[in-house]
């Protein structure tokens, strides 16, 4: 059925999240919700304390029903990871042993590389209070731990799943600065547009006696131009500034721009219109 | 007082987290807890719906009391960010306007650079249901958005704070693969140690008629050595393997290692002892 196929397609989209003996249905739901934000859909539970299915889990999962619908339940951890090629276990505290330790960024990349080469991967998360037992960590290939402040480390399971799912999503972006949408193009305007702004502004200021005494004018022009150059205004921004200067220059509170002064308005509009359309780029 | 000084020191440790009209005290507490995990301590609230202080917030904050104790409350957003040099606003949906849009990694780095140069920074988070209004985003310098799956985007405030706090922490690490603790050194053993393993193993297998027929021996030795070379065993791991080979070679189920066979035990121990201490590195 289309719905199941959709779930199957989603389930193939990354590492499985495996919760070992989760205690609260609500936490399972929050895990599902965290996963869905970042494109993960395969959730496996090992011996959940309150059994399965769980209405509390479904309620806490909010829109992530597809994850809840696809949950697989196992009696033991070896059974839950029997088909996996690579398993990484989340731990907060140091363990003895031979397991390599990764940070989440590195773990995300490892999981992505293995996924790209067709391997089945899983991330293990432990019990709310006790995490994973050493023998359970022993079943994994590597360990991932988060760079938390040791004095206040209190990540819960859903938060740990969120961070790992986030790093999984990031590992698949074409660049780590990619965003779902971008801001406007902010290429600095060509210098002619900037010069046009300077010309108009300096003319309007000159007419009002701003550059006094005359000996100070070169320095004042320098400063003004420096202030208006450093922001690297884009063309769209220069247009806004030109409109501001035109308004200050052509109108006054006594004769504001408006229908009551049609001749003046038309004249100023024409002047402003030509000012706001600089040549070039 | 020492406690307040401690809070003050912590508060200077990074961007302020600003919640605009948070509705639930519990969410404020979860935000505090998320912050504490990653070393942030300065929390500002703008017009919290249920006022302040909040016992629900303190309860949900768990160990992050110091954050709750340091909360500052403001009536309006401009007042809350009056002292800030740089403000970044979290949004889920695209907005019109001139604001640059960053991903969380980039935002973390920007915040770290500005912090390092002594600037005061803040990250804005909006209401549970409605996020930030356009005019509130307008008060910020830039926008940060998370790379969520648009079909299932449902990050709540505490999760968004967690991700930004996490990226803040990461931006301060010496490398993005740094972890609070590391695994054991896994430098591959020097080749002499590997050769010692091969020699013992091949001798033990030869004595048992493994390499048959004789024409196949070179290839079988090749395969065996390739299998034991690819894992790049460290010296500690070679020692474990040498012990395994010694056990299989010197003992049998009929005559296991133990007090009942003192002479054999002493001889085997001596042999195993010299086998487990390879020269070099």
Image (cartoon, coloured by chain):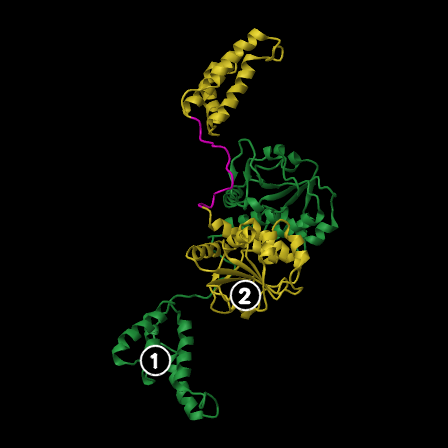
Chain colours: A green, B yellow
Q: Tell me which residue sits at (32%, 74%) in the image.
A: A195
User: Which residue has dot 1 on it?
Assistant: A200
Q: Is residue A248 left or right of A170 when viewed as pictured?
A: left
Q: Is residue A272 left or right of A56 when viewed as pictured?
A: left
Query: Numbered disc 2: what chain?
Result: B
Residue B180, magenta (yes or no) = yes
Q: Which residue lies furthest to the left in this view?
A: A215
Residue B57 in the image, given as x and y percentages of width and height: 65, 56
- Above or below: residue B155 compared with residue A220: above
Residue A132, magenta (yes or no) = no
Mark 2 residue element: helix
- Above or below: residue A228 compared with residue A91: below
Query: Numbered disc 1: what chain?
Result: A
Which region shows up in magenta?
Answer: B174-189
Q: Which of the two residues, A152 or B253, is positioned nearer the viewer here?
A: A152
- Above or below: residue A7 compared with residue B259: below
Residue B191, visible in the rendered structure: yes
């Amino acid at each position: 059925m289309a719905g199941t196929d959709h779930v199957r397609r989603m389930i193939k989209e990354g590492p499985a999240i495996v919760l070992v003996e989760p205690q609260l249905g609500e936490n399972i739901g929050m895990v599902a919700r965290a996963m869905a934000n970042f494109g993960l859909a395969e959730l496996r539970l090992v011996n959940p304390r309150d059994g399965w299915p769980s209405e509390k889990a479904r309620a806490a999962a909010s829109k992530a029903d597809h994850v809840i619908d696809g949950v697989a339940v196992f009696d033991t951890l070896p059974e839950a990871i029997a088909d996996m090629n690579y398993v990484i276990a989340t731990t907060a505290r140091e363990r003895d042993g031979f397991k390599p330790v990764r940070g989440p960024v590195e773990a995300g990349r490892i999981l992505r590389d293995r996924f790209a080469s067709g391997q089945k991967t899983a991330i293990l998360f432990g019990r709310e209070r006790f995490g994973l037992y050493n023998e359970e960590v022993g079943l994994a290939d590597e360990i991932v731990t988060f760079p938390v402040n040791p004095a206040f480390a209190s990540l819960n399971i859903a938060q740990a799943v969120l961070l790992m799912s986030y790093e999984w999503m990031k590992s698949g972006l074409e660049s780590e600065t990619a965003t779902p949408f971008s801001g406007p193009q902010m290429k600095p305007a060509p210098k002619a547009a900037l010069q046009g702004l300077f010309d108009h502004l300096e003319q309007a200021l000159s007419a009002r006696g701003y550059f006094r005494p005359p000996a100070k004018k070169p320095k004042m022009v320098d400063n003004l131009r420096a202030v208006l150059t450093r922001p690297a205004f884009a063309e769209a921004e220069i247009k806004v500034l030109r409109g501001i200067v035109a308004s200050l220059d052509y109108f006054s509170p006594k004769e504001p721009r408006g229908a009551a002064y049609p001749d003046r308005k038309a004249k100023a509009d024409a002047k402003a219109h030509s000012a706001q359309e600089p040549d070039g780029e």
